[in-house]
Amino acid sequence: MARIKPLAELIETCIGPAFAAQGFASTDILAAWPDIVGERLARFCQPSKLEWPRRARREEQGRPDPGTLVVRVEGVFALELQHLAPVVIQRINAHYGWACVGKLVLKQGRVHQAVRKRAPAILDPAKRGEVALAVSAIGDDALRDALDRLGVAIVASAPPR
């Protein structure tokens, strides 16, 4: 019987070469980005590539010199990220356990954000009944269904009293 592989292993083999072309050793930095820079900044910036300095031919085979992380950032947050660059570099290096990033280069542009769906709100059955009763007198089925969905959305999003 074949061993069940975690999805992370399969994804790494599929997109690993694309990340390697951009200088990343793994996809880990994108997954850990909100933990590194914080949720607020992660919504407005993301790493796009890691540029490594060229090695001299006779250079020692120890750790390479720190690279330059190119970060795509939305316009308003570029200034804030520029001020926080030393902290971000320190957090990245702490995350990896060695000084892999020595400098940040900011490129302004749109950041593609993953759309997170909120968990559906738990609706009180009594409130659901009130909405159904309020729209039951409407004769047009399409209008009644639309108003029912609207009523449920409003009741579900209302703060509890």
Image: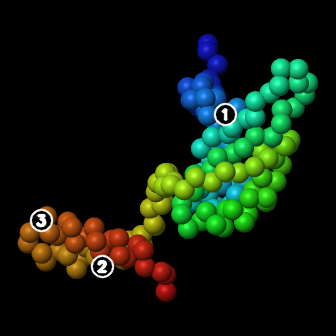
Give the mark nearest the N terminus, 1 or 3.
1
* Residue type indicated by callout 3: Asp
| Label whose residue precedes the other's in the sequence (1 or 2) | 1
* Horizontal side of residue 1 vs 103, given as left or right: left
For image coordinates 64% across by 29% down, the residue present is 20
Task: Please name the residue shown 28% across and 71% down the image.
Answer: 150
Q: State the image quarter where residue 84 is shown.
A: bottom right
- Residue at 61%, 13% (x, y): give it: 1
Q: Which amino acid does label 1 sit on?
A: Gly
Element at badge 1? loop
Neighbour class for label 1 at 10 Å: few (<14), some, many (≥20)? some
| Left or right position of 104 against 71 | right
Spatial CA distance of label 1 from label 2 is: 58 Å
Residue corresponding to mark 2: 130
Instruction: Identify residue type, mark 2.
Output: Glu
Q: Mark 1 points at which residue?
A: 23
Q: In this view, does 97 lie to the left or right of 136?
A: right
Identified at 54% across, 60% down, the residue is 74
Q: Name the residue under label 3.
A: 141
- At label 2, counting other C-alpha atoms closer than 10 Å, the crowd grade (few under 14, some 14-19, many 20 or more) is some
The answer to whether residue 8 is seen in the rendering is no
Compute the Cα span from label 3 to label 2. 18 Å
> Does residue 153 appear in this view?
yes
Percent of width and height locating residue 39: 64, 61
The label on residue 33 is none
